[in-house]
Amino acid sequence: MSGNTVVGKAAAGAKGQDARSQETRDKLLDGALRTLVEQGIAKASARAIATTAGVNQALVFYHFGSVDELLAAACRRGAELRVARHRERLRSVTSLSELLAFGREMHAEERDAGHVAVLGQLLAGAQTHPRLAPATAAGLDLWIAEIEQVLVRVLAGTPLAEFTDPAGLARAVAASFVGLELYEGVDPAGAEAALTALEQLGALMAAVEELNPVARKAVTYTLRWQSGRGR
Amino acid sequence: MSGNTVVGKAAAGAKGQDARSQETRDKLLDGALRTLVEQGIAKASARAIATTAGVNQALVFYHFGSVDELLAAACRRGAELRVARHRERLRSVTSLSELLAFGREMHAEERDAGHVAVLGQLLAGAQTHPRLAPATAAGLDLWIAEIEQVLVRVLAGTPLAEFTDPAGLARAVAASFVGLELYEGVDPAGAEAALTALEQLGALMAAVEELNPVARKAVTYTLRWQSGRGR
DNA sequence: GTCTATAAGCAGATAGAC
DNA sequence: GTCTATCTGCTTATAGAC
């Protein structure tokens, strides 16, 4: 990976260099993420990233070949770190209303960390830099996979399971959150209102979960009739 | 606005220049939008826009002062044009399911035109270029206002009216669509799945509209109980 | 109003010293 | 592996001819 085939003089020396090399790579990955958060994709140049990372500008190209490759690697790593951070708690969620409460919490944390906004920046950049597109899609997929799992578990045994596609829903949730993070950058109050409205919408779905059997049947029946007519 | 205070020689001459000036402005506004669609915010430079518009690069600064000001003006105009295009049809919508069907249609049209993606590009750029933030927010607000009106009308007389905030919901819908357009750039199939899932979600809400009175009462009751408990 | 020419600076990327 | 120095090209923005 690092292309280190050195077997010379001292193993300790090689190891020391290797460790420093890895440290530089980490600094650059972290610097790329921070630059994306603080300055956006438009200003995420090799020089800006290197300055943020506190390393020499030429090292961007030595370690990653190009700025786009560095951004792509940073995107992957960032998504892995953020998703891993929530994974355990997400897997303990068992109901829709629980998921909604946790979603609000997760949003606040991600907003402060700025990593969802980073995905927005990269998504915007990916339209031009083809190398970024697969990396961004991969980063988003980490979130999507996690959300999808929770949705499958939470919707199971609900009338909703019959009429919703967890895979599509997970993608919609992920994309919507990215859009909301970007929107928050230009209208924080509007974004807050939007988030609250989505929570109410979620509560509506959660309410179906807790309906009494008769009403539940009625909803199921109406949905069946609707979907039979709809397509 | 164009600062033309000329009253000299020939009114026709002054008028001719004024007309040509306006034509140049229009070309630049159109060129800015097209450049944003085709190359993204990162490559939307004065030169790139001028080339797309077929005019001289210096005219960007003569007419708009800076690239950011041109982009801001283009954003406003683009949103006005696109919203005006759908306004009439949107105002004829009377039910939620009708709105959903029309939403799909509108999405296909906007995706092809690329103007929602433009809002995404500008939203991403607005994080860095403060001048873009208010313009982008204003452009988005044109969409939001239209969506909000429809939602108010469509949700009235529905049990949903009691538990949803049209203003917040409209913002959520607009932001989500921007996110979806950006997502579509890196994963078209995923975006399609997401859109279909959202449609199902909408159908669920529409189903509540068409519930029989007994079930409707049950849903309303459960929602009231939920919202009383929730906050 | 529109053009050419140009200033001043920042971009990605590389060569070569250490 | 890391550094400095540098090449090339593109950026915003302006001055001045037409």
Image (spheres, coloured by chain):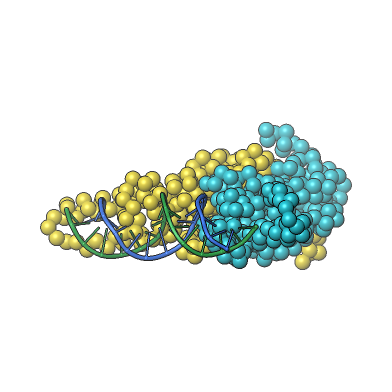
Chain colours: A cyan, B yellow, C blue, D green
Residue at far right of view: A213
Residue C11: x %, y % from top left: 49, 56
- Asked whether, in this view, residue B159 is left or right of residue B40, the answer is right
Q: Residue at x 13, y 55 (%)?
A: B10
**Residue B100 appears anywhere in the view:** no
Counting from the top left corner in percent of width and height, residue A47 is at: 53, 61
Residue nearest the viewer, comparing B42 with A181: B42
| Front-lying residue, A12 or A77 | A12
The answer to which quarter of the image holds residue B66 is: bottom left
Q: Is residue A160 left or right of residue B198?
A: right
Residue B184 visible in image: yes
User: Considering only vertical position in the picture, is D2 above or below B30?
Assistant: below
Residue at the image point whose x is 70% and y is 54% from the top: A77
Residue B75, quarter of picture: bottom left
Q: Quadrant of the C terminus of chain B?
A: bottom right
Residue at coordinates 47% horizontally, 51% vertically from top-left?
A: B43
Where A172 sits versus D13, above or below?
above
- Residue C7 image point, x, y percent: 32, 64
Q: Residue at x 70, y 34 (%)?
A: A229
Please state if A156 lies on the left or on the right of A192 as rendered. right
Q: Residue B165: x, y in percent?
A: 65, 59
Decide which of B209, A173 is in the foreground and name it: A173
Choose between A10 and B172: the one closer to the eye.
A10
Q: Quadrant of the N terminus of chain B?
A: bottom left
